Image (cartoon, rainbow, N blue to C red):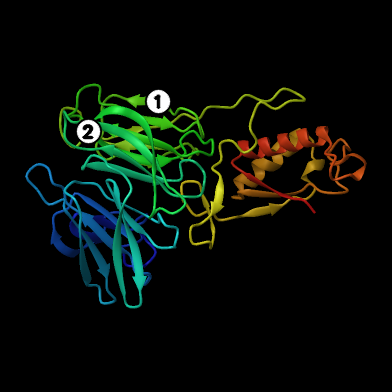
Amino acid sequence: MDGDGDLDVLLGGTVWFENPGNLCTAPDQRWKLHRIAADPTHDIAVADFNGDGRLDAVTRNQSEFGANAGHRIRVWLQQPDGSWQETRLECPHGEGLAVADLDRDGDADIVIGGIWFETLRQPGQVRWQPHRFADFHRNVTIAVADFNGDGRADVALAPSELAGQHCRLSWFEAPTDPRAGPWREHRLADPIEAVVHSLAAADFDRDGRIDIAFAEMHQGADPDEVGLWLNRGPGQLWEKLVVSTTGSHGLQVLDADGDGALDLFGANWSGPKQTIQLWRQRPRRTAEAAPGSSNRTPGAGLQRLRVSDNRRFLVTADGRPFFWLGDTAWWIRHLPPPLLNHYCSTRAKQGFNVIQVHCGFAVTNHAGVPAFLNNDPESLNEPFCRELDRLVAQAREHRLYVALVPM
């Protein structure tokens, strides 16, 4: 929050706690409290809305349980002197809030249930223009990601309140112009009780497609499911996987053990099962391909890469910045399988994430097989391509991308 390079904590209320630094050597230090406003909130997010390099905050209270305050969004712009400038946006009653760059113009927009607020920067000021994209339950949890791989940010919605009410869990496909619409709805669960108070988007099965994690609160009808909707690709039905039936309230996604497989972390806010729970994913090993064939898709298990919305860097399919650290391995095709595995394992341990491979003219593999028949670029040599597929699959097992350089 203060731009000093370490992570601070922002809480509804609205306050933030300043990280004192050096927590590894002095973990018991006190964190300094900074108050933004006396503003009870249910939802909170951060983004640099006005492009001044300082993180701002956006908050929203809820309308249920007597609060009756979810009809207003508050944007808090951080000022150079540490004060905060408030802007209020009127909206329908409800709860739920997220920030994402829906119009791909390089700044963060604000998303609630069925409406998104376009951030419009102007010299010395910023304003927001609402656009409706769906008719949905007024209380929602939200996840924003590119679910169909078209480079546009889609929106997933689920009903979050109240127990006994029902709606649906859907994702809405972003059109070419998110302002004009229409946004096509894809229903994953219909009906579903309005107790889905957790929704998160990530590539859980590492197939390059973004999946959805969800959790139902304990006050709903049993079972209180914690689970995944696995994205099987365009035109395919999503697969539901139930992880637990203990419920959870504010589910978080992380790789707790550093094994490359995403885990789930959370707890119910009250009720008989309030223990903090960690659900660890056990990565599935992929069977080796038989000689002369390949039963694996090269690159499966790694997220697809794309250019960021502001066109300045690469990001993974779920929007995380990707730092390209590549090893130039022009002649890697000359390595037989045992040495290839040793090479990939070594480069992965050294922190590389890309292997740059030459596969063009005057190239042969370890068995002397050329890339083209008679040096004709329109006549690919199938045995060479199979070996190249195995190279890509081997690199994938070590979480390495392969960049083919056809020179």
Q: Is 332 displayed left or right of 266 in the figure? A: right
**Quadrant of res 118:** bottom left
Discs 1, 2 touching: Cβ within 8 Å: no
Q: What amino acid does circle 1 point to?
A: Leu
19 up-or-down from 222: above or below: below
Which element carries disc 1, helix, strand or loop?
strand
| Rendered residue at 81%/36% (across/down) | 384
Choose top left, top right, bottom left or bottom right for residue 185: top left
Q: Is residue 314 visible?
A: yes
Q: Position of residue 168 (x, y in %)?
A: 29, 32
Residue bearing the label numbered 2: 195
Image quadrant where one finds the N terminus: bottom left
The type of residue carrying mark 2 is Val
Residue 145 place in picture, x, y as percent: 42, 46
As measured in the structure, the alpha-carbon distance from the residue carrying label 1 to the one carrying label 2 is 18 Å
Determine which residue is flagged by label 1: 241
Q: Position of residue 219 (x, y in %)?
A: 17, 29
- Which image quadrant for residue 399? top right
Image point 76% across, 24% down: which residue? 291
Q: On residue 143, which mark appears? A: none
Earlier residue among tags 1 and 2: 2
**Label 2 environment density (alpha carbons within 10 Å; few <14, some 14–19, many ≥20):** many
* Relative depth, front residue between 223 and 18: 223
Q: Is residue 19 visible?
A: no
Instruction: Tell me what residue is drawn at x 30 percent, y 61 percent.
Output: 129
Identity of the residue drawn at 22% across and 34% down: 268
From the viewer's perspective, is 158 left or right of 107? left
Q: Nearer the viewer, residue 171 or 266?
A: 171
At mark 2, the secondary structure is loop
